[in-house]
Image (cartoon, coloured by chain):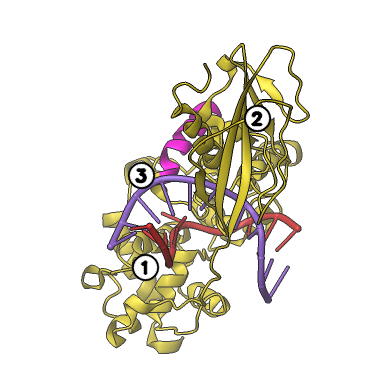
Chain colours: A yellow, B purple, C red
Amino acid sequence: MRDGLYSGVISELLLSWYDDNARVMPWRVGPAERAAGQRPDPYRIWLSEVMLQQTTVAAVRDYFVKFTTLWPTVRDLAAAEDAEVMGAWAGLGYYARARNLLKCARAVVADHGGAFPTSRDGLLTLPGIGPYTASAIAAIAYDEAATVVDGNVERVMARLHDVHTPLPAAKPELTALATEHTPVERAGDYAQSVMDLGATICTPRNPACGICPLRDPCAARIAGTAPDLPRKTPKKLKPTRHGIAYVVRRDDGAWLLETRPPKGLLGGMLGWPGSDWGDDPAPAPPLEADWTTLPAQALHTFTHFHLKLTVQTATVGPEATANRGQFVAQDQFQPADLPTVMRKVFDLTRQEPDLWG
DNA sequence: AACCCGTGGAG
DNA sequence: TCTCCAAGGGT
């Protein structure tokens, strides 16, 4: 072991800290329930871990409660309609997760008798479960000594060992270090302890080294480099794309909406018909109408580009037919089912009091 | 391997 | 305001 940091020392410090400081979350089994012999439900662990991919605990909490209330078991989820699940996921982002969530639930029911595989390798075969999530479920739900490597673990390892290699090149090195520290016993608690530490003490900015359980062995704290680690290769700047969104309302109150193609950006989600998004896309109105252009644009930033959407509106008669999408009755449309950029478009139309007559 | 894929909060 | 970024996976 490099740096003289024996794995047992680190995991013991972290587990001891975790026993007193574990955060309370709806998907966690607390100490009292654990003492009573209760084990984590693999379905709930899986659901929480998928929701937590690149997403904060605060953002996930309400969605987790909603999903487990609507669908208490993996069989319930597997039997749900696609549109129901996509609508329930709306607002949480990274919608491929929701598509894979359904695929995975249905695979668990169809191919595994309704029970999740109990090993990391078995979990890895399922859609939406990658190296991190497979390790997390195996460790937390089944006590397998799998090593969990997420952004928190990478940051803690980079600081503990003062690794200056920038990410993502440093990933193999940080993974190896994390593996050396993973204990055979309580691997699930250990994994959660590192992630809790990263979320509350070993934070990206202004780490609280003074109260850190690893302050003594931490090489970066000793070197004074902790706030600057991990280093990262600079990322590209985001271009700005433009587009037109068309909001059509029929006399009877119905809205013209479309389900977007199943792959790519916002795949499978509900949205307003529109042009392509690019440098100067061609207009693509879904029907012939007397269009009104709203004074304000909808502004939204995705992972890799900014978007400025011009919003055009029209009211049409009962006989109107569109070349795209379908009319949805007023009482069957809920703005909460829209991804955020589409909800912003909707909100802009609500700011025009005289718009719909 | 590099790129694609959302969102809201923190500073 | 703007940048960073959070319990990544798929392709």
Residue at the image point whose x is 45% and y is 73% from the top: A181
Question: Reading the chain from its start, which is encountered first: label 2 or label 3?
Answer: 3
Task: Give, as a single range, the part of the protein colored magenta.
Answer: A59-75
* Alpha carbons under labels 2 and 1: distance apart: 37 Å
Residue A30: give its label: 3
- Badge 3: how crowded within 10 Å, few (<14), some, or many (20+)? some
Q: Which mark is residue A83?
A: 2
Q: Where is residue A163, by image quadrant?
A: bottom left
Q: How many marks?
A: 3
Residue at image x 52%, y 76%? A167
Q: Say which label, 2 or 1, has the lower sequence index.
A: 2
SS category of the residue bearing label 1: loop
A267 or A328: nearer the eye? Answer: A328
Side of A219 where A155 appears, left or right: right
Can residue A48 be seen in this snapshot?
A: no
Q: Where is residue C1 drawn, in percent x and y?
A: 38, 57
Which of labels 3 and 1 is toward the front?
1
Relative to the observer, which residue lies in front, A273 or A195? A273
Q: Chain of mark 3?
A: A
* Residue position for label 1: A204
Work out whether A263 lies above or below A88: below
Residue A182 coordinates in the image, percent (x, y):
47, 69
Give the residue type that dot 2 points to. Ala
